Amino acid sequence: MLKRRTESGPMELTEHDDIRNRRKRAVKTAWALAIVAIMIFVAFILSGVLGT
Amino acid sequence: MSIESHDIAHDDHHDHKPSGFLDRWLYTTNHKDIGTLYLVFSLLMFFIGGSMAMVIRAELFMPGLQLVEPEFFNQMTTMHALIMVFGAVMPAWVGFANWMIPMMIGAPDMALPRMNNWSFWILPFAFTMLLSTLFMDSGGPAAGWTLYPPLSLQGGQSFAFVVFAVHMMGISSIMGSINVIATILNMRAPGMTLLKMPLFVWTWLITAFLLIAVMPVLAGAVTMLLTDHFFGTSFFNAAGGGDPVMFQHIFWFFGHPEVYIMILPAFGVVSEIIPTFSRKPLFGYTAMVYATASIAFLSFIVWAHHMFTVGMPLTGELFFMYATMLIAVPTGVKVFNWVSTMWQGSMTFETPMLFAIGFVVLFTIGGLSGLMLAMAAADLQYHDTYFVVAHFHYVLVPGSVFALMAGAYYWLPKWTGHMYSEKWGKIHFWVSAISVNILFFPQHYLGLAGMPRRIPDYSTQFADFNMISSIGGFIFGASQLIFVGVIVHCVYKSRQVATGRVWEGAKGLEWTLSSPPPYHSFNTPPVIDSTTIAHVEEAH
Ligand code: HEM
Ligand SMILES: [Cu+2]
């Protein structure tokens, strides 16, 4: 892969840094967070339903 | 094109903005344009919410009922808070996040640009709906922004619109935070490690986690109100076996983190500005990151300090009292670090720095009155009085709002490519800083003397301080028009061109771009080195 100069010497850029892969990872992060949000919403309402 | 070429010139080649008005603004996926939309929207809400505050202060200018019906007064206090919290302060911070986070971490845009467009465009609908309730038969919500049942359930049909508006605001905030987290975790330029990120990015990352954790809780709470009101459930209805105090627990489990959602990005902005105008790196960068994380953690275990008077078990009172007082520790670390950053710096006092210093001093007053309220025994007297109103306005107005002003002045030259009028900026600061104290300081005394909050009329012994407070309020309100004048002048009239760096002491990736930055920046990730990172001491 490409290299770029940095202060601490050349830095190897890997597949990991490729913008397409990063965008894919971003979408995964987003889904994970969205699921967490929905679960919190449901959990709080359920706590009300089950608690009474 | 090699990956090394990270020049600005390179980005300029494809600096084409969409030409049509709708293409540019309605369909936009550009983080800078969406940032601008958020900021303009929040300024508009700031003035709508502000005009409601003027109604409140006008009615309270003298004892007795003179201008508005008590019922309408209650709608004003409720709407004022809902609009300021969800329409002005929160969207303004999302606007800053949109503009600055990609530029600060060397990303080409937010990670999910189309969702970004949605997050913004939901808001105008949400607030149109919320405001429209004022014109409905049953009027706007009038039970306070905390929406406590049973009172909040005694309104009419328009309540459904309030709930739906809150749902939409929540969805917008959650989508915005998902975007922020996905961007920060995945889109940083190679070499921009987490502990090299500017503090504003850190505070927003943590804020976004808070938002994702608590906005669904609020959504759940208002959903249960909705079903109690319209579908015969009894979540909070004591007559049907429900528990109204349960609502308070759920609401404040959202509500206390919410106040930190409004203040953490402010901490971030102030931590950017003070080093620039002190010409020194931020003192204790890592301590600041840990302090922010601790505050965020603690914010989840203090909620019942809003409920000391409902009759909790003594152990509960004690737990929430001590947990609340613990927050003062990381908060103190922050104030200490800001002061230490200024210590022996070559300070100058441009408008952003004035607002930042105003923030440090006045926010701390609010923090101290918070500590007074945290004492459960004392809060029995202070609760639901104007002392609480004074407390949260100190942390929110010369706190969050001053930090917003500071950030706006700081980055306005970057955003527009022109310098704003320093003279008018300073006038804006001094008039605001003086009047905000005239407005809110007397409210401490009113509260200590027993004046309840959320009332349209009061006993005559409170008359003098209320009149002073109202005068301060009118001056503060009017002085915000100066801010609009400064912005309009900066955007359309100012001929003083801003350099890329803008401020002599400014560090960070955003300042390596031209002012205004190209429409698409950092399409090729920049190289990260210590000369461009704000908090690294330069090698001599
Ligand atoms: C040192 C940190 C703080 C402490 C110890 C603290 C403590 C408290 C306490 C005990 C109350 C409840 C008073 C009562 O209702 O009797 C309260 C209310 C409130 N605080 Fe704070 N606070 C702190 C910081 C903040 C910050 C940073 C914000 C927002 C930026 C904030 C916003 C509010 C608001 C909005 C209320 C009133 C909510 C309502 O009843 O409508 N506080 N605070
Ligand atoms: Cu609180």
Image (cartoon, grey):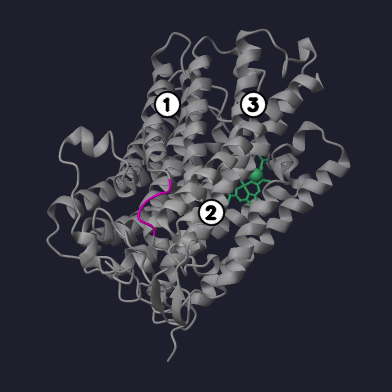
Picture coordinates of residue B61, whole percent (x, y) = 43, 34
Q: The residue tagged with tag 3: helix, strand or loop?
A: helix
> How many callouts does the rendering have?
3
Q: Nearer the viewer, residue B341 or B512?
A: B512
Q: Nearer the viewer, residue B200 or B514?
A: B514
Earlier-in-chain disc, 1 versus 3: 1
Q: Is residue B193 visible?
A: yes
Amino acid marked by disc 3: Ala
Image mark 1: chain = B
Q: Is residue B362 visible?
A: no
Image mark 3: chain = B
Q: The residue tagged with tag 1: helix, strand or loop?
A: helix
> Seen from this angle, which residue lies furthest bottom?
B540
Question: Which stretch is magenta?
Answer: B107-111
Residue at 39% across, 18% down: B132
Earlier-in-chain disc, 1 versus 2: 1
Earlier-in-chain disc, 3 versus 2: 2
